[in-house]
DNA sequence: GAAAAACTCCCTGAATATCGGGCTTTTTAA
DNA sequence: TTAAAAAGCCCGATATTCAGGGAGTTTTTC
């Protein structure tokens, strides 16, 4: 008896999907049943074709609308039987971390070789997870880094004030906006400078932008 | 007589190269003679194999080391007979503009269809340039936008000062670094605030970051 | 229910930034 | 080539930020 695995591909870069298809079509036991360019379409397809047995979803990370992270989460919630392999341009540690927490089965960079792609797919279909040593090291780095930076967690109020500071508002203005004394805002400002280990307003602004708070 | 066109592909995403190859291999008149993952390799290959007639270079925009923009420029300088087609993930208006100024023959987004890819290649090989209407509109938008923002062009000195300001340096420090009076730096600061139409240090920092000057 | 964290407010002096001027030199364009 | 514009430079007055404290109230967390 010959097993054929059913695969769905989600990627808004059609050229990439075409490439992926031509690679997978060379394998006799891999069958692409559907390709979409958004995460929403995948879920819609699965809901309509519940009778169809899908084994693997290969998805891009960055897509318009529902991205790979959200899609993976939804899949694992509603269709836990489907394995997921995320393939991405970038090696975004935070997103990889979230994906692993959501039980993704593998992560591959788009600069991986054809050989590695097939290896990952085979690996996942046989029940194991696949993460290259490189991805693993990124994951570890991210987790340890998060642990380090999570010590400087800001409170809601602090975030609020920081945002307004970065938006060029003066202390007095912020005080008026939040119905607080200007002394209070000055305290926040001081605390933020301490907590974030910056020297001045420029540092605060940079922090705010880098943590996309504006 | 049957013409076969020789093509070189440069992209650090091997999976994409594989996909591209399998698409192009279906065409009888297209022949991939070489694939590389960096721009430097392309130039090296061309220098060594001068006798070989290359018709088209298909290159990614974002690559480690020499990127697509620099590669295109070098190709057009040293091997003006070779047509170039840049394929990129992102639709970066500024880079597209630079590319057109450097006589690139076509620009394609990676989310283009297989059909469009072949159309673009055929178009370029027949002597025309290929830019989709979408890319054209981005180009126009970028150019008009540049014209708009070019009114607030900063001098070299201003950029230098702005950078240092955004890096949390105080006026005195910057003055020391640039061997200028602190009053001078204060003037720059003032002028920058005027020119960039911001209110304070936070605005300057944001501008610097948004125009990736740090 | 106690301890910790968050939130609020206040003070002072020193440092720094901001604003409104004006001046000379270099570059650009009519 | 010669004005006009831009770049580079400086000053003083005022406003704001920064650093160092202290201290009471409310909310979370254990």
Image (spheres, coloured by chain):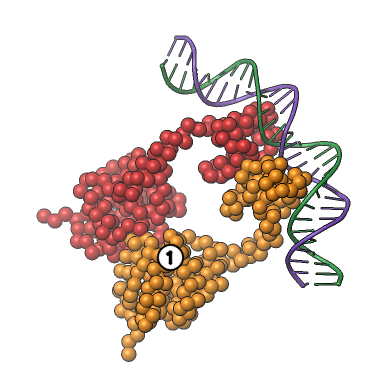
Chain colours: A orange, B red, C green, D purple
| Rendered view: A60 above or below C15 | below
Judged from this view, the residue extending furthest toward the left is B1
Image quadrant assignment for residue C22: top right
Residue A157 appears in the rendering: yes
Per the image, label 1 sits on a secondary structure element best described as: strand
> Could you tell me residue A202's position as x and y percent?
65, 43
Q: Chain of mark 1?
A: A
Image quadrant assignment for residue B164: top right
Residue B48 appears in the rendering: no
Badge 1 local density, few (<14 within 10 Å), some, or many (20+)?
many
Residue displayed at 40% across by 76% down: A47
> Could you tell me residue B194's position as x and y percent?
58, 31
Q: Which residue is identified by label 1?
A: A60
Question: A126 or B139, which is in the foreground?
Answer: B139
| Rendered view: A113 above or below B174 | below
> Could you tell me residue A147's position as x and y percent?
66, 64
| Rendered view: A135 above or below B48 | below
Residue displayed at 52% across by 75% down: A103
| Rendered view: D13 above or below A198 | above
Question: B108 or B66, which is in the foreground?
Answer: B108
């Amino acid at each position: 008896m010959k097993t054929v695995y059913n695969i769905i591909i989600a990627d808004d870069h059609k050229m990439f999907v075409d490439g992926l298809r031509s690679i997978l079509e060379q394998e006799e036991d891999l069958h692409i049943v559907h390709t979409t360019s958004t995460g929403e379409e995948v879920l819609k397809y699965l809901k309509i074709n519940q009778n169809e047995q899908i084994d693997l979803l290969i998805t891009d990370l960055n897509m318009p609308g529902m991205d790979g992270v959200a899609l993976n989460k939804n899949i694992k919630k509603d269709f836990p039987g489907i394995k997921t392999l995320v393939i991405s341009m970038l090696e975004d540690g935070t997103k990889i971390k979230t994906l692993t927490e959501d039980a993704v089965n593998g992560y591959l960079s788009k600069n991986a070789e054809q050989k590695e792609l097939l290896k990952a797919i085979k690996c996942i279909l046989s029940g194991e997870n696949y993460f290259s040593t490189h991805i693993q090291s990124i994951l570890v780095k991210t987790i340890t880094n998060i642990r380090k930076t999570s010590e400087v967690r800001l409170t809601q109020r602090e975030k609020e004030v920081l945002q307004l500071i970065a938006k060029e508002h003066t202390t007095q203005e912020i005080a008026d906006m939040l119905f607080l004394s200007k002394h209070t805002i000055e305290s926040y400002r001081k605390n933020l400078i301490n907590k974030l280990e910056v020297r001045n307003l420029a540092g605060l602004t940079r922090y705010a932008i880098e943590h996309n708070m504006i």
